[in-house]
Image (cartoon, rainbow, N blue to C red):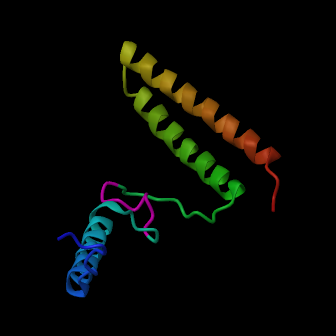
Amino acid sequence: MPKNTPNPPDDHVSRNTKKLDDAATRALDYYLKPKADKDTCDTPDTLFIIAPDIDAECLLANLSETLASANAMVSDLAFDLEGSRRHIALGVQQMIELGQLLANRALDVVEVR
């Protein structure tokens, strides 16, 4: 004879299901959910990073100094070379010089906070 009401849920089975669901969620979160407190740029292949709170004027000043150093190195190298290699080095020096001029101009118009 069929019953009119279904059997009540078994507490033991529902508790085990809840534990399994929690364990599965923890496992998936561990392997698939990214950590919020870790920066994405802090990877083993990152050698240098720039502090996030540096202002634009300081960044441009350092860029200008870096370009000036690169300009001096390529200039010194170009005068040790001959022929087409010298022309390539002088072309690179000219591009560095142009970048330095752009950085210096940006430094002139940057608003100090």
For the question of whether residue 50 can be seen, the reply is yes
Q: Which percent across, then down, holds residue 45?
A: 31, 54
Number of numbered discs: 0
Is 98 part of what is drawn in magenta? Answer: no
Dominant SS of magenta comes to loop
Q: Residue furthest top?
A: 83
Residue plotted at (79% across, 49% down): 110
Q: Which of the pair 33/111 is nearer the observer?
A: 33
The quarter in which the C terminus is drawn is bottom right
Q: Which percent across, then down, holds residue 90?
A: 49, 23
Q: Which of the pair 76/24 is nearer the observer?
A: 24
Q: Is residue 53 left or right of residue 33?
A: right
For the question of whether residue 83 can be seen, the reply is no
Q: Which of the pair 49/2 is nearer the observer?
A: 2
Q: Which percent across, then down, holds residue 98?
A: 63, 30
Q: In this view, does 3 lie to the left or right of 75?
A: left
Q: Which residue lies furthest to the bottom in this view?
A: 11
Q: In this view, does 37 lie above or below 113?
A: below
Residue plotted at (29% across, 76% down): 22
Residue plotted at (24% across, 76% down): 17
Q: Is residue 14 left or right of residue 71?
A: left
Q: Which residue lies furthest to the front in this view?
A: 1
Q: Is residue 16 above or below residue 95?
A: below
Residue plotted at (28% across, 74% down): 6
Q: Give the range drawn in magenta.
A: 38-45
The quarter in which the N terminus is drawn is bottom left
Q: Which percent across, then down, holds residue 16?
A: 21, 81
